[in-house]
Amino acid sequence: MNAMHAKPSASGLWPLIGLPKRQIFALAGVRGARLHSHRGALWVTQDHDRRDVVLAEGETLVIERDGRLLVQALDAALLSVTTPVRSAVPRTTTNWWRWWSRWRMHPAA
């Protein structure tokens, strides 16, 4: 069986992906993304994860770890992948914490 691969556009948006019955779709490095079945059932497995998940039509799975993910259409299926939007808050908080730590070590006179 051949695996189908896709990548998000430059804006980070994935297209709707149609899979015929038994077609495999491969993803990698999409931790935090949401996999949604718009039509048909999907079998989902991920490297180093003992759990396999079957998504029914209308169900969503949040991908909890990095690594290769395989999605197989149990019926003709339509799916989407939504990547998480990264927030600037943690980075800003980290920068503020670094500044605060340095200031405590060497306060201005």
Image: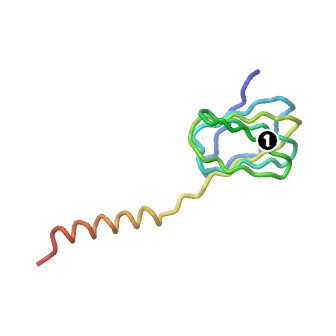
Residue furthest to the top: 1
Say above or below: 13 vs 68: below
Q: Position of residue 36 (x, y in %)?
A: 76, 49
Q: Measuring 86% from the left and 32% from the top, which residue is drawn there?
A: 20
Q: Mark 1 is on which residue type?
A: Val
Q: Is residue 86 left or right of residue 70?
A: left
Residue furthest to the front: 50
Q: Measuring 88% from the left and 36% from the top, which residue is drawn there?
A: 76
Comparing 59 with 80, the one in front is 59
Comparing 90 with 7, the one in front is 90
Q: Quadrant of the N terminus?
A: top right
Q: Quadrant of the C terminus?
A: bottom left
Q: Position of residue 13 (x, y in %)?
A: 66, 50
Residue 67, quarter of picture: top right
Q: Is residue 55 left or right of residue 97?
A: right
Comparing 57 with 6, the one in front is 57
Say above or below: 15 vs 19: below
Q: Position of residue 107 (x, y in %)?
A: 16, 74
Residue 23, quarter of picture: top right
Q: Measuring 59% from the left and 46% from the top, which residue is drawn there?
A: 31
Say above or below: 37 vs 24: below
Q: Residues within 10 Å of mark 1 (few under 14, many from 20)?
A: some
Q: Which residue is mark 1?
A: 54
Residue furthest to the bottom: 109
* Kind of element beneath mark 1: strand
Q: Position of residue 43 (x, y in %)?
A: 78, 37
Q: Is residue 55 left or right of residue 11?
A: right
